[in-house]
Image (tube, rainbow, N blue to C red):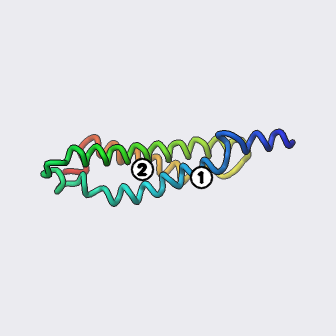
Amino acid sequence: MAKNKERSTSGLNDKFLGNMFTTIGAVGFFFLCMLLPIVGRSAVSTPYYKQNYLSYLLVLLVTLLCSALGWVLKKKRSAADGSPYPKVSLVLTCLYSVMLIILLTGGFNN
């Protein structure tokens, strides 16, 4: 019994890691909202739009990676010990995926 409990709380099944990545992903949403004007319609005419676009893309990819990793870790833990399904992490991951598609198709600057 102690061995099973030890296995479920160590390594990638650790509760702290899933919560940490989900929290970073959630805070990243607010940071992305603050950075959104640098890739919007009025920012296209600036000479440094390319650098702004790349910085926004980098932040978006980091937050997408963190939320996806948090979702995967929490999903594994949920399957192992019956904890609740990580709905918030899944919603964040879907939201960032949609934002990435919109960014790559040029939807933010139309």
Which of the image's four quarters has the N terminus? top right
Give coordinates of residue 84: x percent, y percent.
66, 52
**Residue at disc 1, secondary structure:** helix
The residue shown at (59%, 52%) is 19
The residue shown at (53%, 55%) is 23
The residue type indicated by label 1 comes to Asn
Give coordinates of residue 21: x percent, y percent.
54, 49
User: How much space separates mark 2 and mark 1, taking CA atoms?
Assistant: 18 Å
Give coordinates of residue 4: x percent, y percent.
81, 40
Label 1 neighbour load within 10 Å: few <14, some 14-19, many 20+ = some
The residue shown at (67%, 45%) is 14
The residue type indicated by label 2 comes to Leu
Q: Along the polypeptide, which appears first: circle 2 or circle 1?
A: 1
In the image, is residue 7 above or below residue 90?
above
The residue shown at (35%, 59%) is 33
Number of numbered tags placed on the structure image = 2
Q: Which mark is residue 48?
A: none
Which residue is nearer to you in this view: 91 or 8?
A: 8
Q: Is residue 27 left or right of residue 54?
A: right
Q: Is residue 38 left or right of residue 24?
A: left
Quadrant hosting residue 73: top right
Q: Which residue is disc 1 drawn over?
A: 19
**Residue at disc 2, secondary structure:** helix
Q: Is residue 75 left or right of residue 7?
A: left
Residue that sits furthest to the right in the current view: 1
Q: Which residue is disc 2 drawn over?
A: 95
Q: Are the residues tagged 2 and 1 within 8 Å (C-beta)?
A: no
Label 2 neighbour load within 10 Å: few <14, some 14-19, many 20+ = some
Nearer the camera: disc 2 or disc 1: 1
Q: Is residue 98 left or right of residue 49?
A: right
Give coordinates of residue 90: x percent, y percent.
52, 48
